[in-house]
Image (cartoon, rainbow, N blue to C red):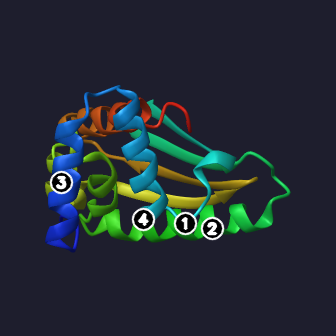
């Protein structure tokens, strides 16, 4: 599934097309779009993606474990995203990173074959994506690399 508003999809496509993959302009555009999608503060949290043999582990942590507001926002957001991902809705990452994000099409189409566990961890939350399908494992890895590249200052 794609962003709910066609105007958002058009704006994302134009912004992505206007910026090279690792340019300062693209980094700024990613950060700005991220602020509209993620309720937690990107400057005070760390987002990590760890590829595994059967999928991916995504962890978001508040840099200050005592910042209960950020910890709560991270946990709520990842729980919500896990529900959307299970339904094949990867609209939020597409809004931030663009409709042509690597792995996105495969993840949306193969959602029924990906188990997603969400759990709170100290200072944040974790999503664990697991699949027996090697093509979906590859799609998860490509999707994670795209996010890591785009968020390198926040991850």
Helix, strand or loop for disc 2: helix
x and y, in percent, of residue 127 in the image: 50, 53
Above or below, 113 against 87 in this view is above
Secondary structure beneath label 4:
helix
Whole-angstrom CA distance, mark 3 to mark 2, is 28 Å
Kindly report the distance in space between the C-alpha atoms of the residues bearing marks 4 and 2.
12 Å
Residue at mark 3: 110
Report the disc number at residue 39: 1
**Residues marked 2 and 1 touching at CB (< 8 Å):** yes
Say which residue label 2 marks: 73
How would you rate the neighbour count of disc 4 (Cα within 10 Å): few for under 14, some for 14-19, many for 20 or more?
many
Residue at x 23%, y 53% (from the top left corner): 12
Q: Which of marks 4 and 2 is nearer the N terminus?
A: 2
Mark 3 vs mark 2, foreground winner is 2
Distance (Cα) linking label 3 and label 4: 16 Å
Which residue is denoted by mark 4 in the rendering?
A: 81
Q: In this view, does 109 lie above or below 18?
A: below
Q: Which of marks 3 and 4 is in front?
A: 4
Residue 69, x across and y down, in percent:
74, 68
């Amino acid at each position: 599934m794609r962003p709910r508003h066609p105007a958002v999809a058009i704006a994302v496509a134009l912004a992505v097309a206007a910026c090279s993959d690792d340019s300062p302009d693209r980094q700024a555009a990613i950060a700005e779009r991220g602020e509209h999608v993620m309720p937690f503060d990107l400057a005070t949290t760390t987002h990590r993606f760890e590829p595994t043999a059967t999928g991916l582990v995504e962890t978001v942590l508040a840099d200050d474990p005592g910042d209960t507001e950020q910890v709560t926002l991270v946990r709520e957001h990842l729980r919500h995203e896990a529900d959307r991902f299970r339904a094949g809705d990867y609209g939020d990452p597409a809004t931030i990173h663009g409709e042509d994000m690597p792995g996105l099409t495969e993840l949306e189409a193969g959602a029924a074959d990906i188990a997603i566990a969400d759990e709170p961890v100290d200072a944040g939350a974790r999503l664990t994506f697991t699949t027996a399908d090697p093509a979906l494992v590859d799609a998860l890895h490509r999707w994670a690399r795209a996010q890591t590249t785009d968020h390198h200052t926040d991850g």
